[in-house]
Amino acid sequence: MERGRDFTDLALGLVSAQSFPAIVGIADHMLKSSDVLLVGYEKIGSGHCTAIVRGRIADVRLAIEEGAERAQQFGQELSTLVIPRPDPNLEKILPIGSLLAQLTTGTRGHRLSSHAVGLLETRGFPAMVGAADAMLKAADVMLTAYETIGAGLCTAIVRGTASNTAIALEAGMAEADRIGELHAVMLVPRPLEDLDQSLPLAPALQKELRPLQLPLNLKQKETEPLVLNAATEDAVAVEASPEALPLEPPSP
């Protein structure tokens, strides 16, 4: 599908599941099986997440069918919807086109775009934090963000090579089970650009850090001049008197 075209004449497809790693895996499968564009996710609480795609009607229908099949493999109860040529009023009200603006601004991409994506979902925030710490210590991965979708479900998202991400997920699963409840795990070895740009990122990845600029304009604190009384001035004068100091070193 040509990325520079007007998307208003295309169909809209929605797939809903009850796990963030599951909906990411479903979205990845839809993108790789059909010529559609992932425009984002909607999270409405209680663990419900919806992936939203755009494309030609036939492509969207195929993507939704493939997404439903993958959801069944994940054991997910889901709902799907295909809307051919959605009304412009619908697009203005619903947040279903936020990613489209990025296609024309050139603000896409970051330094981990080529890395695998690992998602580990727990029920309970302490279990997610513990699992994230275990993943970072077990393999060369970076924690890029975490996602909450309600019902106590939290997802830690890590990036790294496919092998490192797989090792990290194994360590995270064991730690999550030890602390609390492990809910879902997903590994995406080669994420497409559309999938990658829809995932949350840490602020450090969204903005490049700027080096420290020198010299620095440091303001020094001004000190008050020392005021000497008369007795102190006389003492200083005596100590500094030329008569009191030897002018030549003593002869041996």
Image (cartoon, helix red, strand yellow):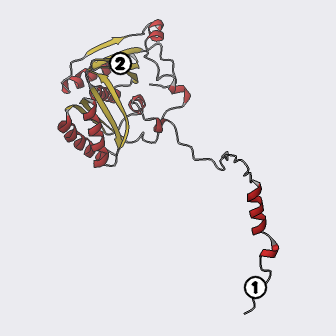
Q: Is residue 213 left or right of residue 84?
A: right
Q: Report the residue that reaches farthest toward the front.
A: 231
Q: Say whether disc 1 or disc 2 marks the residue closer to the N-terminus.
A: 2
Say above or below: 64 vs 231.
Answer: above
Say above or below: 186 vs 140.
Answer: above
> What type is the residue that disc 2 sits on?
Val
Rendering coords of residue 106 (x, y %) = 54, 31
Residue receiving disc 1: 249
- Asked if the residue under mark 2 is in contact with the one under mark 1, i.e. CB atoms within 8 Å, the reply is no
Q: Residue at x 25, y 29 (%)?
A: 124
For mark 1, does the 10 Å Cα neighbourhood hold few (<14), some (14 to 19), or many (20 or more) residues?
few
Q: Residue at x 43, y 16 (%)?
A: 96
Task: Give 23 or 244, whichever is nearer the viewer.
Answer: 244
Q: Residue at x 35, y 18 (%)?
A: 60
Rendering coords of residue 76 (x, y %) = 21, 22
Q: Residue at x 32, y 45 (%)?
A: 136
Say above or below: 94 vs 205.
Answer: above
Residue 14 found in image quarter: top left
> What type is the residue that disc 1 sits on?
Pro
Rendering coords of residue 170 (x, y %) = 22, 43
Task: Give 115 or 206, whichever is nearer the viewer.
Answer: 206
Dot 2: element? helix
For mark 2, does the 10 Å Cα neighbourhood hold few (<14), some (14 to 19), or many (20 or more) residues?
many
Residue receiving disc 2: 60
